[in-house]
Amino acid sequence: MIAKNFKDYPLSDELLKAIEKLNFKNPTKVQEAVIPLALNNKDILCKAQTGSGKTAAFGIPICELLNWDENKPQALVLTPTRELALQIHDDIFNIGRFKRVKVSALYGKSPIKRQEKELKQKTHVVVGTPGRVMDHIVRGTFNTDEIKYLIIDEADEMLNMGFIDQVEEIIDEMPENRVTMLFSATLEPEIQRLSKRYMKDPQVIEIEAEIKSTDAIDQELYESTDGDKMELLRDVLLVENPDSCIIFCNTQERVNAISNSLGQDNNACEKIHGGMEQDDRTRVMHRFKKGEFRYLIATDVAARGIDVHEISHIINYDVPWEKETYVHRIGRTGRQGKKGTAITLVSAKEEHLIKEIEEYTEKEITRKETPTHSILDTLKPAFNEKLQAKPEEKKDKAFDLTKEIMKLHINAGKKTKMRAVDIVGTLCNLEGMTADDIGVIVILDVSTFVEILNNKGEQVLKELQTRNIKGRLRKVSIAEDKPVVQRDHRFRRSY
Ligand code: AMP
């Protein structure tokens, strides 16, 4: 079945509403191919890049098919990086928002106890990095008996990062009777081996990398010597004056060096790499997504899958060692129908890498002349002006979905025997409220979080100031959403 509209799929109203509020107008190519098969419980081996909409391609069918009443996890999504785990967690949570789908993210360097507590509650979907997922399986805190859907995302990156043994150990823990979907940017022999070994008659889908067919990204390069690159970077930034850009480097040391150098005269930049504490990484990524600063200096930890809206420029300070990485990096721009620019600074010893990239992408990269002093002088005032200005805040991609949802915090939890049924009971007794207006409920030791849907949050908040919940007046306020904070040390490849 080929559908051009999500309404053509057998999806529930709750899901269609979320899809509409997320502004997904039509299914992307990968969604057209994957959704009908996944809804029919087929195993799928899919070659697709990030940015193709593949998270929703598996997220929509999983949310549709899972049984809300089952308390044990029914779907597991394995992903190579913590940033990606968090992003996929948020994407699936948003898709399943009106079905009240509960999603847990499990990744290292985040307190394991907190994750354990979360897993004790109803959890429909688990998204995690292999190490921490295995930890929970071994500890017996992640019950895999009811897993019906296993998704291995970015499988080629799992291979690159040395995670594949752990992934196989995890697969061995899954029930035989399950659907397996494997997504990978390449279908190299090792990926084929995995699919043969662990999948049942998989349907093979190949979606060509858009980068090969798109003109959305202007690709340019400047020739340079190693010693001159920092100066050239400054000049390029001055000429391009980007609103939002990622400067990619091959090593953590280089990220630190550029950050130190650029940071002296430019407070518009922040850095991210695998050597940083995870809470700093998460905070930086969160602020960059919100548009709070303009230049992110990064290793490839930010290349795979990271979905930030409206990045106008990608600058490769170092030419990446692998041609595929180039495609992942520049694919962070030119998204959602916007034009993007990708600029690479190339020293003589990196020339051969550029040739490989050009052959791989079947596109010639435009050679640019180093900007002259007079051009730089003319452009400097505009550059300085933007540097002083407060950057424009970026609208969250789920803005239209979240704007009608209010998350409330209730100052009572498990320790006072609060249960979801107590919350639902109270809320449904309020004037004009029905169960359909109640979203996800999370009960912690001394706190409860409940989402109020359909723009009814203000009214509920007001009424709960004078209304008893489970026999007593509770302190009820708007919950603040902060980025989740975690730490990890088990990274194999250090970006
Ligand atoms: P992904 O490849 O899963 O990282 O998705 C890339 C981006 O496309 C994300 O920002 C998604 O929210 C967005 N997206 C996914 N599906 C659609 C769709 N059908 N229409 C528009 N945007 C989409």
Image (cartoon, grey):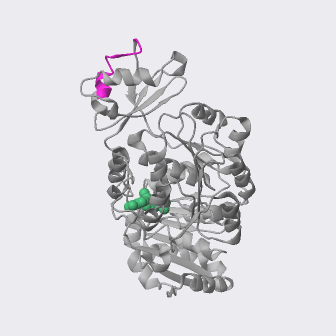
Total number of numbered labels? 0
Where does residue 105 sit, x and y in percent of width and height? Answer: 57, 44
Residue, x 45% and y 39% (percent of image)?
Answer: 481
Look at the image and give the residue range highlighted in magenta.
460-471
Question: Is residue 354 shown above or below 11?
Answer: below
Q: Is residue 374 magenta?
A: no
Q: Nearer the viewer, residue 160 or 326?
A: 160
Please indicate, yes or no, whether residue 166 appears anywhere in the rendered image. yes
Residue, x 71% and y 67% (percent of image)?
Answer: 190
Q: Nearer the viewer, residue 185 or 90?
A: 185
Q: Nearer the viewer, residue 316 or 229?
A: 316
Q: Nearer the viewer, residue 72 or 383?
A: 72
Q: Is residue 466 magenta?
A: yes
In the current view of this chain or complex, which residue is farthest to the top?
A: 471
Which quadrant does the C terminus fall into? bottom right
Question: Is residue 255 shown above or below 433?
Answer: below
In the current view of this chain or complex, which residue is farthest to the left?
A: 432
Residue, x 60% and y 40% (percent of image)?
Answer: 146
Where does residue 404 sit, x and y in percent of width and height? Answer: 31, 41
Q: Is residue 411 left or right of residue 231?
A: left
Quarter occupied by residue 194: bottom right
Residue, x 64% and y 58% (percent of image)?
Answer: 199
Where does residue 166 sit, x and y in percent of width and height? Answer: 73, 52
Question: Is residue 470 shown above or below 368?
Answer: above
Q: Is residue 283 left or right of residue 257?
A: left
Please indicate, yes or no, whether residue 288 appears anywhere in the rendered image. no
Which quadrant does the N terminus fall into? bottom left
Where does residue 101 sit, x and y in percent of width and height? Answer: 46, 40
Regarding ligand 1, which quadrant of the image does it lie in?
bottom left
